[in-house]
Structures are given as C-alpha cells and as structure tokens.
Amino acid sequence: MLVVIIMLSYVLTIGCMHMQVLSESVSKALTLSGDPEVTETAKFALMFDHFFDCLNVTNFTSGKHSRKSFQNPFRSKNDFRIKCLQDEFLPYLKEWEEEALKADVNEKEQKKLILSTETIRGIEMTESSG
C-alpha cells in the first residue's frame, strides 16, 4: 500500500503524465518483476488505467484499434465496465481510504495518504452518470 501512496504522490506531482505512469504496461511490468511488494501498485495502476480508458472513448473504433476493451464505446447501461467500476474500482478506493485512515500518523499526514474528498466524489459522479 505504501508503494501505491508514493506512486500517487509522484503522479500528482507530474500532473498530465499520469496516463503514462498509470497504464496497463506499467502494471504488467510491475507484475512481471515478481516482487510481492509491488502487487498493490500494479493493481492500482491497472485499475486507474481502466478508469481512464472508460473516460477516453473518442470514437466508435478506438477500442478495436488499441486492443483495449475499456476504450470501446458504451452501448448499453449493462456494460461490463459499469459493473467493474461499481463492484471493483469504487470498493477498492474505499478500502484504500480505510487502510490509510488506520495508519499511525497525524491527521495532516493521513490526508496525504488518500485521494481528496472532491476527487472521490468526482469519480463516484462520473461512474453513476452512465
């Protein structure tokens, strides 16, 4: 979990480069390293990659050309990606927040370990607007 937090701090620092850091290829590279300490970071990168892909649908064929199913256009309110966001991504973020709030640090430091309330609310609104 600490590696995820450090990675998120890095992502927030570099701003617009988040698409390259939080990517499926980074997730795969971390997983292939075989280091058990990066398992959560790999999961974090993959989940955000899928989330960004859902938001990054630019045309009807982008998912086919990139071979990324999360970039296909939404055609149904029963799309598997909506279920994935509801049943996996949002609970993962909630679990992350709960773990961070258990950390033995002061309140200021705890706030650095989690996404802002506004960010979480924005993700929830984006997910529920489908």
Image (cartoon, rainbow, N blue to C red):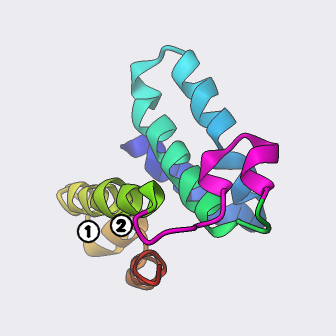
Q: Say which quadrant the N terminus sits in.
A: top left
Q: Dot 2 corresponds to which residue?
A: 109
Q: Between 25 and 83, which is closer to the camera in this rendering? A: 83
- Horizontal side of residue 119 vs 19, given as left or right: left
Which residue range is magenta in the image?
61-78
Q: Between 78 and 129, which is closer to the camera in this rendering? A: 78
35 is higher (above) or lower (below) than 44:
above
Residue at horizontal 57%, vertical 27%? Answer: 30
Q: Between 130 and 20, which is closer to the camera in this rendering? A: 130
Query: Secondary structure beneath disc 2?
Result: helix
Q: Say whether marks 1 and 2 touch (CB < 8 Å).
A: yes
Q: Between 100 and 96, which is closer to the camera in this rendering? A: 96
Query: Secondary structure beneath disc 1?
Result: loop
Q: Count residues near mark 2 (Cα–Cα under 10 Å), then give few for <14, some for 14-19, many for 20+.
A: few
Total numbered labels: 2
Q: Position of residue 11 (x, y in %)?
A: 64, 58
Q: Is residue 65 magenta?
A: yes
Locate residue 91: give its quadrant.
bottom left
Q: Position of residue 78 (x, y in %)?
A: 40, 65
Q: Amino acid at mark 1?
A: Asn
121 is higher (above) or lower (below) than 45:
below
Q: Count residues near mark 1 (Cα–Cα under 10 Å), then give few for <14, some for 14-19, many for 20+.
A: few
107 is higher (above) or lower (below) than 2:
below
Residue at horizontal 72%, vertical 51%? Answer: 63
Q: Is residue 54 magenta?
A: no
Marks 1 and 2, how far apart at CA = 5 Å
Question: Could you say which disc has been placed on residue 106 in the image?
Answer: 1
User: What is the residue that sits farthest to the top in this orientation?
Assistant: 34
Residue at horizontal 33%, vertical 53%? Answer: 88
